[in-house]
Structure formats: C-alpha cells, structure tokens
Amino acid sequence: MDAADEFGIAASAAALHTLKDLAKKPDDEADRAQLANTYTDRLVPERSPGNALYIELRKAPYQICPLCGHRDISTLDHQLPKGKYPLLSVVPINLVPACGICNWLKGEHVPETAGDQTLHPYYDDLSDQQWLFARLKWTENRPPEVTYFIRSPEGAGDVLAVRVFCHFQMLRLAELYGPNAVREMSNIRGILRAMNAAGRHKYLLLAEHSILTDKRAGGHNHWKRALFQALAGDSWYLESGFDQF
Ligand SMILES: [Zn+2]
C-alpha cells in the first residue's frame, strides 16, 4: 500500500493520527528534504512541471476557502503537513484549496488523537447539519457584540463532535466571524429602519433561509446564516437594538 492509499483509508476513518509511521518515512534526511521540496519546487512555481495540476487543485467553487468559508482561496493546504510527512507532500487528497490564513493557522500541526484534527473537506461532509451558532450579547453601557459558538452536529459521533470543536478553535473562527457580523449588521441597519419589528423579523428569516438553502451562498454553517438566525430570535434587536450597529 502506498502513502496515498494509507492516507485515504485513515482520512475516511478520521484516523490521521494513526499515520505516525508514515512521518518516519523515508528515513534518509536528503530524501525527506527532496520530497518535501517537491511541492515547493515542482508544483507551485509558475513554470514548474506540476503547475497545471497545482492550478487545477486550487480551483474550488466560488474560490472561497472551505476551511473558514469566508476568505478567498490563495494556496493549497496540506491536511497533514509536508514538513512532517514528506511522502504526502504531493498526494492530491492531502492537498486542500485554502486561504493563506487558514493555511498558516494549521501550520505544522500533527494530530495526536482522533479528535485532534480539523475537518477535511473531502472526507468530513457536515454541510447539511448546523454546528455553527451565534448569539447577540448586549448589556447596559457596553457596545453590543456577536459571539459565535458551536454545538455538536446532530447524530455526529463523539470524535466528529470533538473535531468540529478543534476546527473552530484552531482556525480561530469566532475571531473571524464576530467582527464580520457587526459589520454586516451595520450594512443592513438602513434596510431594517424602513420596516417595523414584524417586517424586520420576516426579512431576517428570509435572509437566513436564502443562505441556508443555497450551498453557493454558504449553506448551514455560514457565519451569516448563524447571524441572521440569532438576530431573528432576539426581540431587543428587532424592536430597537438594530439601530445601535
Ligand atoms: Zn480560510
């Protein structure tokens, strides 16, 4: 069995942490360095032999990073880092189109346990289950804020639930989504002003629904879906709070 097969089987079983032996191969340092550089030297540079494949792999629908669901794709992320797993440096199923920041945040992380892995877009499809939620926090004398949190996806096993948490933490999604949410609320303030509370409620439900039912718009776990859902359920926001953003 080659490294790609080993990776595929482990990824399907959420068991990338069991591939520690693969990290030891090849044992010759020069070979390791050469393999690790294959990606950098022969895939990424514009005139390199593998550049057409690199471009093809980076293509994803609408060019949005599948890891954060927000920033533009600008690179390929190694699900298991090439520096630690030279044999996987150019294995396509180990290469995920991603934004530069998600790529940087994952860094050289090597999973220690089954739960200690970010979600792999080719293997962990949770696109029809909501796990991302938002909550509006408002108290006297403090600017209101939006906090994001996760709940275990329904029916997901323990390992997947822990991995969703790992994904959320490692990619610092709460830090990304919170400020975006406040900007979005500022964007829709003018629209909401033209409506009464019932109209605002209806508008927000519609906005949530349009994202939820359209994978291209983000689907179940897009930060805007969670935001509109939270706002539609917040009577303070619907009555008067919307005007404070
Ligand atoms: Zn990203």
Image (tube, rainbow, N blue to C red):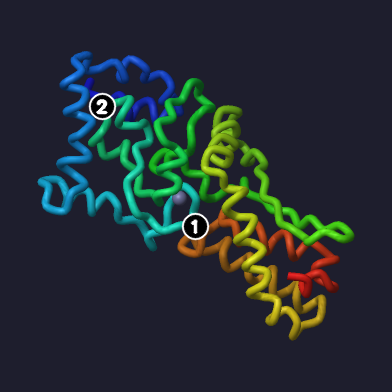
Pick whichever, 131 or 34, lies toward us: 34
In the displayed structure, would residue 192 be above or below residue 87?
below
| Left or right of residue 11: residue 145 | right
Identify the residue at image location x=65%, y=71%.
206
Looking at the rendered structure, the kind of residue marked 2 is Pro
Identify residue for label 1.
70
Label 1 environment density (alpha carbons within 10 Å; few <14, some 14–19, many ≥20)? some
Image marks 2 and 1: residues in contact by CB distance under 8 Å: no
Horizontal and vertical percent position of residue 187: 63, 74
Label 2 environment density (alpha carbons within 10 Å; few <14, some 14–19, many ≥20)? many
Task: Kindly state the secondary structure of the residue where label 1 is placed.
Answer: loop
Q: CA distance from mark 2 to mark 1?
A: 29 Å
Quarter assignment of residue 96: top left
Identify the residue at image location x=26%, y=39%.
92
In the displayed structure, would residue 175 be above or below residue 183?
above
| Left or right of residue 187: residue 143 | right
Identify residue for label 2.
86
| Left or right of residue 202: residue 138 | right
Residue furthest out toward the right: 140
Horizontal and vertical percent position of residue 221: 57, 52
Q: In the image, is the residue at mark 1 within 8 Å of ligand 1 by its beta carbon? A: yes
Query: How many numbered discs, if any?
Result: 2
Horizontal and vertical percent position of residue 236: 85, 66
Quarter assignment of residue 192: bottom right
Residue furthest out toward the front: 141
